[in-house]
Image: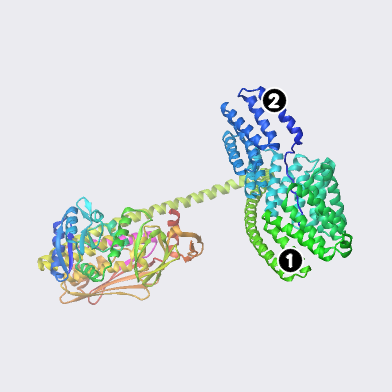
Amino acid sequence: MKKDILLTFFCVISMAPFAQQKKIDSLIGELNKHTQQDTTRFFLLKNIARAYNNTNPQKALEMADEAIAVAKKINDNIKMASALTTKGISYHKLGKDSLAFAVSNQALDIYTKAGEKKRAADLLFNMGYIYFDIANYFEALKSHEAALKLYEQLNSLQEQADALNSIGNSYMRLAAYPASLENYFRALKIYNQVNPEEPNSMVLTNIGNVYYHLSDYPQSLKYHMQAINTDELSGNQENLAHDYDNLGNIYDEMKSTDKALEYYLKALSIYRVLDDRRSIASTLMNCAVIFQKVKQYDTALNYLQQAFQIYESYTDEYKMSGVLDGIASLYMQASNTFLSRQHMSVAERNAAVNKYLEQSHRLALKTGSLSKQSATLELMSSAYEQQENFPQALNTYKESVALKDRVLNDETKQTATRQGMQYEFDKKEALTKAENDVKKILAAAEINQQQTEKNAAIWGAVILATASVFIFMFYKRKRDAEQQQIDAEFKTEVADTEMKALRSQMNPHFIFNSLNSISDYILKNDIKSADYYLTRFAKVMRMILENSDQKEVTLTDDLKALELYIQLESMRMKNKFSYEIIVDDDINPDNTMIPPLILQPFVENSIWHGIANKDGTGKILIHIKKEGNLLNCVVEDNGIGRQHQATEEQLNPEKKSLGMKITKARIDIINKVKKSKAAIELSDLAEGLRVEVRLPLELSF
Amino acid sequence: MIRTIIVDDEEHCIDRLSCMVAEDYSDSILLMDTAKTVEEGLTAIKKLQPDLVFLDVHIQDKTGFDLLNQLNQINFSVIFTTAYDKYAVQAFKFSAIDYLLKPVDPDDLKQAVYKLQEKIDKDEIARKMEVLFYNLKHTQNVAKRISIPTVNGFVFVQVNDIIRCQSEINYTTIFLTDKQKLTVAKTLKEFEELLGDYNFFRVHNSHLINLVFIKSYNKGKGGSVTMTDHSEVEVSTRRKDEFLKKLASF
């Protein structure tokens, strides 16, 4: 049999009904006298509505509506919102919760817009309470958390603690116990801050309940005891009774039946004084369980019957079914002496058990609670077993298990949501913790700082003098270094610009030389081959323009352009020479960078000065090889060589190659920027000329 | 016979191309008409339904793209012709659309005509054109698309869906955001040239990465970068400085 755990709330205790009616009558009298639609009438209407909310919610609704109308007429939004709030409570009492939330939200909207934080927070708090009441714990959490935030802004401690307690309650219902405890403790801390003399028993009780659920009975006992102390001091009988009841539960779990019974009976006597019939019934059931355990079947039966009567008066089917189960199991378990005292044969006993259980099952079906139905069916199955009606026992057992599976499925879902909630909570918690840590660190840092400051004041003066000398030196050195850096950057930039200028000079040089060739070609050849020559030329031109845009190009690209150029010249000279381009195997032409068109002037020179003037065919060899960290580009021809060229140049000094001059200048700049030892070296061969251009080996990757 | 029209606003260009076609391709290309304006071109295309159009990029104050835009359906091959237009050439390369640079080199023409004789999928033409127009519309934007030739035909990929490219000798593997991999018979260098202006950087001889998808840079001699797909790419020592500079300005 499951026991009830009561969650305690901070809520308004309502007046006894008859006193309320008296108050309403006098207020209605006032209302009838005061017919003018003004503030006075508004307050009368609202107060009547509030009073009716406890006795006649339908009437309360009418009054609230009229109050709203008055508020509208006098154009007072805040009053309107307060009337809407009252109307929300009326709807809730009538069980029309979605309407209740609709009007409450309207009111909330008004308060929020008007910046009425306190009223908004109170409203949210009450909305959360209603959500809790209808078992919508997620929304309850949301509302209470929103209320908490506002209370924090308003700095009202008592309300913050109340909100935290309510949040704890929702987590508790969702079985998110750590989150629940956390909030209760926060609430407890604030309550103690507000009223250090008298600890808040409500939250102590709740904490005790969480530990109960976590099966940590000693802890649970500790907190319940604290709650009892407070309640005994303050004389809050109702709370005290709850505490005793809870204590009974704990002792029962701890298997000390005597103590359990003692506290249950204490609770029962208080409940009887308070005439709290529901609590009486629930405690009677708890007592019955104990009596049955100690085999006092007569007393147990008596208590169960009393409880049944009370629940019957409330038509609480769930509980009634529970009591019937209790009675049935009592009969099933009871000894023969008990049966004989009841003048019952075994057959009569069996009939009675079946009757109770069937009745219980009918009630359980009405409640729609699967777990209740499953529990009753399980009991029925064991009853059938006892009566040796095995097929029936099996059937009911199967039914019970099927239901239990469905319940478990639901529970799994609940567990998932619960875990989700716990996760959310942990996340929030981690954030707060991180924030707190930062605050702590900052605080510690500040304390440190203050100490350090004192010391620093003394040492600082000494150190400052020494430091300033060093700093000045350091600064000077750094400034010099920076200046050097700036100078270097400037130089690089100048070099880049010069380089670009030189590269662009290469273009016209190349274009006009080529145009010359074309014109020559056209004069000497047919139109068709002239056209072919021209299109080739266009292609070379395009490539060279693209390459000369760049500081460096890959060896592959440059050699491709160079080869096209050589083909062009070879065509023009009617294949007077052949050529060969060799790149050594230890060079990856795709990964090696060279300045564009650096070799072209030398090749041009070889063709037009070396080979053109030679009798017979010539050959040009271009060989790229690696020499340490240099790239050696060799252009070799078997032409007429330098001596003859020299004479030609003397004859025609204009012809001195512009391309060569530009290339030399480019290499000088490369050396300056890269601090390298690039160089051009010319050497005479037995037949022809060798030019070696050594460049710093630049790899792209 | 490939039924062909030439659209170019300059008479000498038309004459030259006509001559080349008449001399070398009289048995495979049938030149049906030439046009000197966009309007003339449109009329000719609609009337004659050609298989191929040689289309100049700049036609007076309009472009060849304008002409194509005015057609509901492009069911013929197009070979663009242009003298010097870096921007257009880039667009063609992105879309894998054929183009000839003027003056037209006979070898280039030969190759273009040879390609035409392969079986041409009309659908593919349309899709390539779509990519071309998309890219022309989205200039200077990383949302550009690129046509990538694979073993099973062309794949059309958004540039900002490419996380990185890796070279495998003469092939390049492209890693996409949807975890797909494409292997293409093109060198990494070609992709570097194509994508260099779109936040791509060659960090290594065999790696070209999209800077957008860098998750972190791990220090080291050259260091390495971790991409958003959790792949780790080595940065070559020589590229480190330039890479960090590029990353800083990115």
Q: Nearer the viewer, residue A372 or B65?
A: A372
Residue drawn at the location 75% of the way across and 67% of the way down: A384
Quadrant holding the C terminus of chain A = bottom left
Tell me the residue that label 1 is attached to.
Answer: A381
Q: Which quadrant of the view contains residue A295?
A: bottom right
Left or right for A665, reference A196: left
Q: Which residues are magenta?
A: A654-680
Q: Position of residue A17 (x, y in %)?
A: 75, 36
Pointer 2 or 1: first along the chain = 2
Q: Is residue A653 visible?
A: no
Q: Nearer the viewer, residue A548 or A139?
A: A139
Q: Which quadrant of the view contains residue A508?
A: bottom left
Kind of residue indicated by mark 1: Ser
Q: Is residue A419 visible?
A: yes
Residue drawn at the location 76% of the way across and 62% of the way down: A354
> Mark 2, residues whose alpha carbon is within 10 Å: few (<14), some, or many (≥20)?
few
Q: Position of residue A178 (x, y in %)?
A: 70, 54
